[in-house]
């Protein structure tokens, strides 16, 4: 899993490590080697204005380094979310892939739907709830339909969230009427789940790939860490993970456990 994390995000991880190191060195040098006399001279007399020129020249580089650290850290967090979402989607697919619908195709469609739902719920804490970031999928008809279909589920998720944090003072202060629902709808719209291996046999591997399109929160570093949307107004980055788990389909000829079930009993 750690190898997959490094391989799938080598560029973002390299930028995060480099920018963090540069930022740490700059802070260290500014504390230990800063010319505080020059700063005092600049504040006391205009004759020290020439000392401000190096600060003005290096400040944009310093600011860009800080932005790279912040945005690349966000990408790492979303990557952790997709790794967890891929595992949960695979677990959900195993349960529903081993079901007994009318046909194998219906079984596969049902498993894919449940896996995508599981991945969306898992990615909700890592998704954006900002109204401006909904532009990422406003041009994608499939994603827009997904967001609309997810509206009822967003109310359920928001209700459960409120029950969880509503009894605490900190949780009550951060509760917003639409923010949590918007995060759920964004996750449902921009999280894709695909099966790369789905043979419905005992112990066969099921490979699930989860892709989440996250918006770039800091536009200034979008050219470095993101991709410009064809609409031309924002940047995004696709973050994905793959999970491989064995199926738990029964070994019987009809792929059933052999235990009858009468739905009219309940």
Image (tube, grey):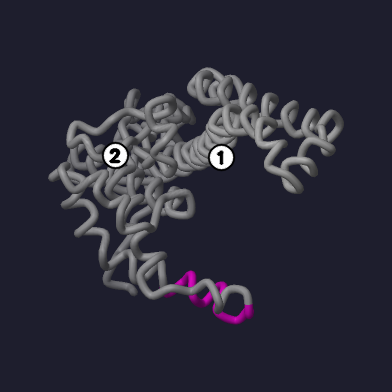
Q: Residue at x 63, y 80 (%)?
A: 169
Coordinates of residue 247 in the picture (x, y in percent): 44, 33
Q: Main secondary structure of the magenta part?
A: helix
153 vs 25, nearest the viewer: 25
Residue 70: give its label: 1
Height in image: 15 above or below 168?
above
Residue 161: percent from the left, percent from the top? 48, 70
Residue 234 is marked as 2
Q: Is residue 230 above or below residue 259?
A: above
Q: Quadrant of residue 224?
A: top left
* In the foreground, 196 or 133: 133
Residue drawn at x 39%, y 39% as measured from the top left: 219
Q: Residue furthest left?
A: 141
User: On the image, which quarter does residue 30 sit in?
Assistant: top right
Q: Residue sitting at 63 percent across and 22 percent down?
A: 18
Asked whether residue 10 is in view, the answer is yes
- Residue 69 visible, this orientation: no
Q: Which residues are magenta?
A: 159-169
* Residue 162 is inside the magenta segment: yes
């Amino acid at each position: 899993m750690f190898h997959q994390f490094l391989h799938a995000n080598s560029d973002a991880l390299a930028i995060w490590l480099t920018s963090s190191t540069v930022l740490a060195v700059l802070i260290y040098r500014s504390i230990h080697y800063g010319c505080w006399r020059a700063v005092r001279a600049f504040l006391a007399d205009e004759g020290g204005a020439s000392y401000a020129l190096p600060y003005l020249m290096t400040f944009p580089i310093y600011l860009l380094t800080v932005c790279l650290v912040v945005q690349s850290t966000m990408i790492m967090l979303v990557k952790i979310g997709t790794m967890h979402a891929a595992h949960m989607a695979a677990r959900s697919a195993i349960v529903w892939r081993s079901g007994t619908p009318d046909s194998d195709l219906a079984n596969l469609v049902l498993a894919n739907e449940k896996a995508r739902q599981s991945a969306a719920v898992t990615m909700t804490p890592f998704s954006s709830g900002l109204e401006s970031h909904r532009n990422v999928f406003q041009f994608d008809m499939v994603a827009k339909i997904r967001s609309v279909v997810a509206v009822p589920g967003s109310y359920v998720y928001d209700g459960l969230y409120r029950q969880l944090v509503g009894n605490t003072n900190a949780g009550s202060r951060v509760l917003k009427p639409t923010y949590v629902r918007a995060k759920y709808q964004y996750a449902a719209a921009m999280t894709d789940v695909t099966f790369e291996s789905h043979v419905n046999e005992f112990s066969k591997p099921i490979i699930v790939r989860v892709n989440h399109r996250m918006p770039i929160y800091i536009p200034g570093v979008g050219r470095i860490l993101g991709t410009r949307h064809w609409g031309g107004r924002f940047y995004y980055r696709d973050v994905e993970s793959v999970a491989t788990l064995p199926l738990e389909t029964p070994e019987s000829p009809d792929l059933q456990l052999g235990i009858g079930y009468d739905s009219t009993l309940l």
